[in-house]
Image (cartoon, helix red, strand yellow):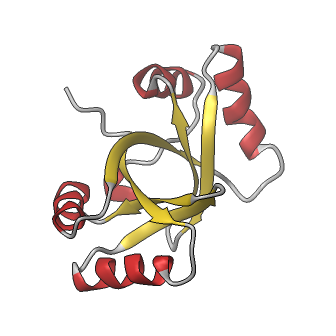
Amino acid sequence: MPEENVIIQLSIFVNNEPGRLAAIARTLKESNVNMKAFNLAESAEFGILRAIVDDPEESFEKIKQKGIIVKKTQVIGIVINDAPGSLFDAADVCGREGINIEYGYAYAGKKLSAFFIRVDDPHRAVAALKKAGIALVKGTDI
């Protein structure tokens, strides 16, 4: 059974050289892929553009057909309130449950703000966060 709080993220590989991000962005535009949230991380030779998009399955196929290396991964979105301690509450639950947050990035939309995180077991993380009363994002919320 799919978990409504487990969201598909696309990880798009971008060579770390001038013009490559523009070329990827052009391809996304031409493929009508709308990014809702994204993060660009770099290493010495390549970067990874992690993105939450409108229709991840269709977007994945469009990007792949253009010859771009893309992967699907699962993330969860934690609703972050505009108040001190909001990040602590969620991170503390994960830490106490032995759930490692591998990486994350913030999102601020018209309806909500969130912290998207990648963990080793998103279903266990969703259960632990819900049990602690932490509000989570559904894929349809953004």
Q: Position of residue 130 (x, y in %)?
A: 50, 27
Say whether residue 91 is visible: yes
At 81% from the left and 43% from the top, the residue drawn is: 85
**Quadrant including the C terminus:** bottom left
Q: Residue at x 31, y 84 (%)?
A: 29
| 87 left or right of 65 in image | right
| Horizontal arrangement in the rendering, residue 9 relative to residue 130 (left or right) | left
Say left or right for 33 vs 102.
left
Locate the N terminus by quadrant. Answer: top left
Check the image and report above or below for 71 versus 48: above
Observer-nearest of 137 and 7:
7
Q: Is residue 142 visible?
A: no
* Observer-nearest of 77 and 111: 77
The answer to whether residue 79 is above or below residue 27 is above
Q: Residue at x 39, y 76 (%)?
A: 24
Nearest the viewer among 78 and 30 is: 30
Taking depth in this image into account, of 21 and 85 the one nearest to the observer is 21
Name the image quarter holding residue 99: top right
Left/right placement of residue 67 relative to residue 136 reads: left
Question: In the rendering, at what x and y percent does residue 63 appear?
Answer: 24, 66
Dividing the picture into quadrants, the one containing residue 132 is top right
114 relative to 73, above or below: below
Give how far across and how far down residue 105 sits, in percent. 61, 54
How many numbered discs, if any? 0
Identity of the residue drawn at 19% across and 54% down: 57
The residue sitting at the right extreme is 84
Residue extending farthest to the top is 97
Across and down, in percent, residue 31 comes to: 22, 78
Q: Is residue 37 above or below residue 73?
A: below
